[in-house]
Image: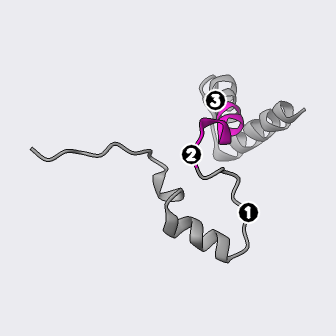
Amino acid sequence: MAKRKQHSAASQFTSQAFTDVLKDAGARISMDGKGRWLDNVFIERLWRSLKHECVYLNAFETGSQARQDIGERVFFLQQ
């Protein structure tokens, strides 16, 4: 039976080919190259808070209403 390699869903964004493209374009990469959890923890917490405190609790009637309410929540979370 063939062995399967486990990998992160976002591993394509840490591949050498992808990071080389970013470096060649002069982009600064925030990760330390080791894929540490700390690199992403703050944005992951923001998305978790936004989903649990706004998106999951509301049945938005329209995309415009969702955009407005989510925008207001993001503004609040940034304070």
Q: Secondary structure at mark 2?
A: loop
Q: Is residue 77 above or below residue 34?
A: above
The image shows residue 8 at horizontal and vertical percentages of 44, 44
| SS assignment for the magenta stretch, majority | helix
The image shows residue 67 at horizontal and vertical percentages of 72, 44
The image shows residue 74 at horizontal and vertical percentages of 79, 37
Q: Secondary structure at mark 3?
A: helix
Q: Secondary structure at mark 1?
A: loop
Q: Residue at x 19, y 45 (%)?
A: 3
What residue did someone put label 1 on? 28
What residue did someone put label 3 on? 48
- Determine whether, in the image, residue 8 is placed left or right of residue 58: left
In magenta, the rendered stretch is 34-45
Q: Is residue 59 above or below residue 74?
A: above
- Determine whether, in the image, residue 1 is placed left or right of residue 5: left
Q: Is residue 68 magenta?
A: no
Q: Which mark is residue 7?
A: none
The label nearer to you, 2 versus 3, is 2
Q: Are marks 2 and 1 in contact (CB under 8 Å)?
A: no
Q: Residue at x 14, y 47 (%)?
A: 2
Q: Amino acid at mark 3?
A: Arg
- Residue placed most toward the observer, 77 or 42: 42
Considering only order in the chain, which callout, 3 or 2, is on the residue closer to the N terminus?
A: 2
Q: Residue at x 64, y 46 (%)?
A: 63
Q: Dot 3, crowdedness within 10 Å: few (<14), some or many (≥20)?
A: few
Q: Amino acid at mark 1?
A: Arg
- Determine whether, in the image, residue 61 is placed left or right of residue 13: right
Image quarter in which the C terminus is found: top right
Considering only order in the chain, which callout, 1 or 2, is on the residue closer to the N terminus?
A: 1
Q: Are marks 3 and 1 in contact (CB under 8 Å)?
A: no
What residue did someone put label 2 on? 35
